[in-house]
Image (spheres, rainbow, N blue to C red):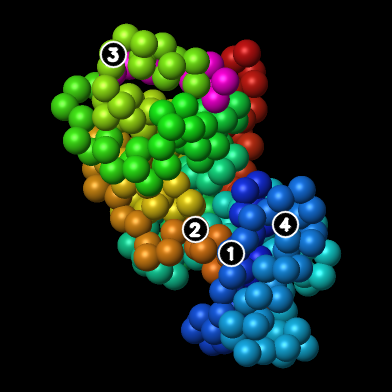
Amino acid sequence: MIVAGIDVGGKNVHTVIMNDGKILGKSSQPTGIQKAEAAENSFNEALKEAKLKRGDVERVVATGSGGKRATFADGYIADAAADARGVIRLVPSARTIIDVGGEEGRAIKIDADGRVKDFAVNEKCAAGTGTFVDTMARALEMPVEEMAKISLNSKQSIPMNAQCAVFGESEVVSLIHQKITKTDIARAVHDAIAGRIASVARIVGLDKDIVMIGGVARNIGFLDSLKRELSSDVVVPEEPDFVGAMGAAVAAASGVTQEEVKAKVVEREDAEEGKS
């Protein structure tokens, strides 16, 4: 059965076309302002790579913050459920997922069957997201890849307290004026993001194996900081930014288009609300 999964994120759209678990074609492109158009274009590019026509695909399921803009899809699955289905397929031993993309960071606890047991989301401005990394790299006047690489050479930990990209950029400029090396500032940026993501992950609990996905999983500097923050190894799939789309494709193959988080999540939220 030929199926497709489309992950429409805030920064990029990822599409995966599969047949009986085998990937036939995939595509990634910037989301831009016109999310519906970007989803269409990504799907068409994946079809082209797979040498297929649209009619060859029996079922399409979308996910992501803009997933419902892919109006040609047959169904929609929540981000956490898509991540869980994609990860459990690639790493059967996974029990905790950390997904950091351009606009959001989340942690998900799953069971042995890839069902979502609990999840938590980082919602504090851009802190703990790929956008924060991009902004800090611009402040340091270097590509993200270079910032990630040089951070590994840092020998000291510099605290960074900014809770959003705007204040973070100002703090980076201030550190430069204090003659702090770019190497140490790069580590400070990654440590700050790792600390916020680790806090989110601890809400759901850190059961091994811990798997990191999303575009930021390609950042070796952030990954190094996260491992230190968690005092644990972290597994990264070969193409971490395509895992959500793969999970949506797996859902398409099984005929599932929605998955609800267990009642304990609601109970936790109610409890937290009662404290405020």
Q: Are marks 3 and 1 in contact (CB under 8 Å)?
A: no
Name the residue tied to disc 4.
67
Residues at discs 4 and 2 in contact (Cβ within 8 Å): no
User: Can you identify the residue that label 2 sits on?
Assistant: 241
Q: Which mark is residue 28?
A: 1
Q: In the depicted view, which residue is nearer to us: 185 or 159?
A: 185
Who comes first in sequence, dot 2 or dot 3? 3
Give the prevailing secondary structure in the magenta stretch. Answer: loop
N-terminal of the pair, mark 4 or mark 2, is 4
Circle 1 or circle 4, nearest the eye:
1
Q: Earlier in the sequence, mark 4 or mark 3?
A: 4
Of pointers 2 and 1, the one earlier in the residue sequence:
1
Q: Which residues are magenta?
A: 158-168
Labelled disc at residue 179: 3
Are discs 4 and 3 less than 8 Å apart at CB?
no
Q: Amino acid at mark 4?
A: Gly
Alpha-carbon neighbours of circle 2 within 10 Å: few (<14), some, or many (≥20)?
A: many
Mark 1: amino acid:
Ser
Q: Position of residue 122 (x, y in %)?
A: 54, 33
Which image quarter: residue 45?
bottom right
Q: Are marks 1 and 4 in contact (CB under 8 Å)?
A: no
Q: Is residue 40 above or below residue 133?
A: below
- Location of residue 71 with respect to 187 vertically, above or below: below
What's the CA distance linking mark 3 and mark 1?
39 Å
In terms of secondary structure, where does tag 2 sit? helix
Q: Give the residue displayed 24% in from the left and 48% down from the top.
A: 233
Q: Residue at x 50, y 37 (%)?
A: 134
Quarter of the image that includes the C terminus: top right
Q: Amino acid at mark 2?
A: Asp
Residue at 59 percent of width and 82 percent of height? 49
The kind of secondary structure element at disc 3 is: loop
